[in-house]
Amino acid sequence: MRVLITGGAGFIGSHLADAYLGRGDTVYVLDDLSTGSIDNINHLRGHSRFHYTIESVHHAQTVAELVDQCDVVFHLAAAVGVRLIVESPVRTIETNVHGAEVVLAQANKKKKKVLIASTSEVYGLSEQVPFREDGNLVLGATSKGRWSYACSKAIDEFLALAYYRERRLPTVIVRLFNTVGPRQTGQYGMVVPTFVRQALSGRPITIHGTGEQSRCFVDVADVVSALVKLMDHPGAVGEVFNIGSSEEVTILELARRVKSLCESSSEIVHLPYEQAYGEGFEDMPRRVPDLGKIGGLIGYHPTRSLDQIIERVIEFCRAAD
């Protein structure tokens, strides 16, 4: 099979490229390197079945040419990370909404199957935990810039489902929950690599807010395996799926685990949200996925515990330094 991955030089995209090359497929990557890195795909650049193009997903002609060469499309290109969302809201909205528009329009011309990567952020301030795919989305006020990301990804979902229902384009939507693993950078606010690098260097491990907010972290290998299976499964078309873990942990406990596993002497400190992200920032108190739907279709369940996930990040960070 020939696979196109937009955002393929990113953290998740590069692991997805590894997986498809590993099973004998041909991979085409499109990335403008705005948040991805050529370092993530350097090990693939000499591979006979790997091809990459450095260009924006907004460039319709480039996307059209790549779609023509491929059988399926993974649209992972997006603005990522809380810091980028807060600091560059225009870029966030334009990247997410227009990028999906271009990919879906070009894929529709040849009816190429498309998987759209959405996010757990779309659940917003919902208190219906664990989050089900058919549950209500509860976004904050438009004056709170943080919700622009969630709204832009929700529009991507609406558009993908509209293409499926109105134009019979085979689309699949996944909502990713706190994916972690090697190659992930803390540059845009990703908490696990940030904590690990702070702990390994002996710097204070910095928690935003009280630390009582909770999350569920999943290894990138489990996410990639699920993406491949969903793309292969005809029953996934026209559906939305959570991908994540149900092992819930507070951010304070996460910091303590990272400190312990790194054997670090770092102090754990708290930083008010206002200092980290500016006045009026809102956060989700809990973010836990219901995994029944994806489990029922492809037998999905996470294979790595939180400690194993953290240890993989520690190993990667130590090797990279």
Image (cartoon, helix red, strand yellow):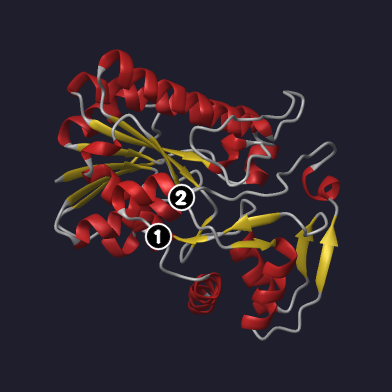
Q: Quadrant of residue 253?
A: bottom right
Q: Residue at x 62, y 82 (%)?
A: 261
Q: Residue at x 25, y 37 (%)?
A: 235
User: Is residue 91 visible to us here?
Assistant: no
Crowding around mark 1 (Cα neighbors within 10 Å: few <14, some 14 to 19, many 20+) is some
Residue 119 at x, y = what percent?
A: 52, 41
Residue 181 at x, y = what percent?
A: 48, 64
Left or right of 183 in this view: 269? right
Q: In the rendered structure, which amino acid carries the disc numbered 1?
A: His
Marks 2 and 1, Cα distance to the nearest angstrom?
8 Å
Q: In the rendered structure, which amino acid carries the disc numbered 2?
A: Leu
Instruction: Residue under label 1, please give it.
Output: 301
Disc 2 on helix, strand or loop? loop
- The image shows a total of numbered marks equal to 2
Q: Residue at x 59, y 29 (%)?
A: 136
Checking the image for residue 291, the label placed there is 2
User: Is residue 60 visible to us here?
Assistant: yes
